[in-house]
Image (cartoon, grey):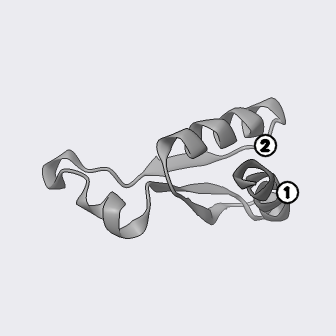
């Protein structure tokens, strides 16, 4: 497996948790990072999105396909 890279930006926590459960079910390694910072009261989430998903590059296309199906 390759190094983890930023695959996509997530819009909210519900979307993040749903995608996380699907990826776990399929055995796809991933990491979800929230942009929330209590010191700034979440200001970065309003500017940059809720957070982002990182995964090995070889899973990028599969993850993006799953993400599009979740969004529709």
The quarter of the displayed image where residue 14 is located:
top right
Q: How many numbered tags mark residues here? A: 2
**Crowding near the residue tagged with mark 1, few <14, some 14–19, many ≥20 C-alpha atoms within 10 Å:** few
The answer to whether the residues at label 1 and label 2 have Cβ atoms under 8 Å apart is: yes
Please tell me the numbered disc located at residue 28. 2
Discs 1/2, front: 1
Asked if 18 appears above or below 32 in the picture, the reply is: above
Please tell me the numbered disc located at residue 62. 1
Q: In this view, does 1 lie to the left or right of 45?
A: right
Query: Foreground residue, 1 or 18?
Result: 18
Please tell me the numbered disc located at residue 9. none
Percent from the top left, x then y, of residue 53?
59, 55
Asked if 16 appears above or below 45 in the picture, the reply is: above
Q: Which residue is drawn at 83% across and 59% down?
A: 65
Q: Is mark 2 on a helix, strand or loop?
A: loop
Q: Which residue is drawn at 77% across and 61% down?
A: 64
Mark nearer the N terminus (1 vs 2): 2
Q: What element carries label 1?
A: helix
Residue reaching furthest to the left? 39
Percent from the top left, x then y, of residue 19?
68, 42
Q: Is residue 33 left or right of residue 17?
A: left
Q: Which residue is drawn at 69% across and 32% down?
A: 21
């Amino acid at each position: 497996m390759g190094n983890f890279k930023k695959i996509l930006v997530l819009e909210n926590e519900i979307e993040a948790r749903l995608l996380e459960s699907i990826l776990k079910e399929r055995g796809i390694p991933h990491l979800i990072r929230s942009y929330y910072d209590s010191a700034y009261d979440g200001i970065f989430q309003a500017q940059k999105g809720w957070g982002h998903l990182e995964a090995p590059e070889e899973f990028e296309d599969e993850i993006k396909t799953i993400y599009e199906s979740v969004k529709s």
